[in-house]
Amino acid sequence: MSCVLVRGCAIGEGRPKVILPIVEKTEAAILKKAAEFSTMKADCVEWRVDWFENALDAAALTHCLHGLRDALGEMLLLVTFRTKAEGGEIAPTLEQYAAFCKAVYDSGCADLLDIEFFPTGNALPGLIEQAHAAGLKVVCSSHDFQKTPLRSELVARMVAMQNAGADLPKLAVMPTCRADVLELLAATAEMADHHPETPVITMSMGALGAVSRLCGEAFGSAMTFANPGQASAPGQVPLDVVNMILESLALS
C-alpha cells in the first residue's frame, strides 16, 4: 500500500494515524478545543464545518481556519463539511458546497479536505483537481448509515474514488450483523492487496463495528477516528483506548 506524506506524517505507513473531530458551534469553542487537542497523542484534527454556526459564510470560515492553523501548529488539519445526505448537519446546494471548498483552498490553512463522493456527482474530479492545485490532499468519502453494501460494491466505490483522483478513499458503513463487519474488513484488505495506488480509510460503525477502528494496520485502513470526549459518529472509541490498542496490535 502506498502512503500519502503530509507535514512529515506518512499516512498509510505503520500504525493508523489518529484523527480527533471538532464538532463545536462557535469559533471560540472550536479554537479552544483545537488548543486542547494540540497537546494530545493524535496525528490529525478534523474540523466538522457543518456544526459551525457560520458554516456557509466564507469570511467567517476563513477567519476560523486561520485560528485553527495557529492553534494546531504542525498537527494535521482535515476540513470536512458533512452534508445532511451523508449524516451531517446541513444540506447545502452544490454551489454552496463548491464555495466552501474554494474558501478552504484559498485559505492555505488546511492539509486535507474531505470531498463527498455521491453528493458532488460529476463535479467531483474538478473539485479534487482544484484541491490538488492548492496543495491539499483529498479524502473522498462515502457513508451508509443503514447497511453494509456487498464487498464488491465497497471495492468498486473506493476504486472509483481513486480514479477520480482522490488521495485517500474513505468508507463508513453500518453493520447489521457480524458478517457485515467482516465484509468491510475484507474489502479493506482487497484494496490494500490489489488496489494499492492509494491508502484507504474504512470503518464499520456502531458498537458492533468498533473493532474495525482498531485493526487498521493489519487490514489496511490508514487512519482512524478517536473520541476525545465528544464523538462525531457512532462507535468512536476513546482516544486513550485507541492509542493503547494500536500500540498493542502494531505489526512492527
Image: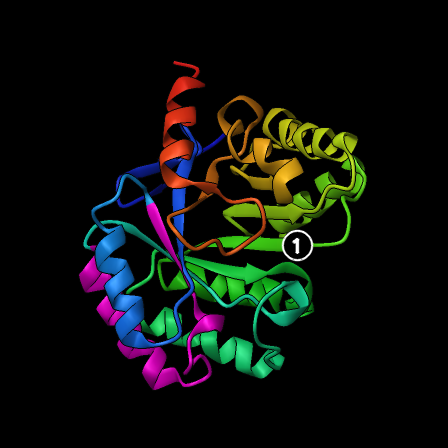
Residue at 26 percent across and 39 percent down: it is: 8
Occupied quadrant, residue 112: bottom left
Occupied quadrant, residue 123: bottom right
Q: Does residue 16 lie above or below 138 as drawn?
A: above
Residue at 33 percent across and 85 percent down: it is: 59
- Depth check: 45 or 5 in front? 45
How many marks the image carries: the answer is: 1
Q: Amino acid at mark 1?
A: His
Residue 213 point in image, percent of width and height: 53, 36
Q: Does residue 199 lie above or below 37 as drawn?
A: above
Residue at 44 percent across and 79 percent down: it is: 55
**Where does the C terminus fall, quadrant-wise?**
top left
Q: Is residue 49 magenta?
A: yes
* Circle 1 SS class: strand
Residue 78 point in image, percent of width and height: 39, 56
Q: Does residue 48 lie above or below 176 as drawn?
A: below
Residue 14 appears in view: no
Task: Tell me if 168 is positioned left or right of 27 in this view.
Answer: right
Furthest toward the top, the residue is 252
Residue 197 point in image, percent of width and height: 55, 35
- Depth check: 44 or 158 in front? 44
Residue 244 point in image, percent of width and height: 37, 26
- Depth check: 249 or 200 in front? 249
Q: Which residues are magenta?
A: 44-72
According to the image, label 1 marks what residue? 143
Residue 34 appears in view: yes
Residue at 30 percent across and 70 percent down: it is: 29
Determine crowd level at label 1: few under 14, some 14-19, many 20+ residues with C-alpha closer than 10 A: many
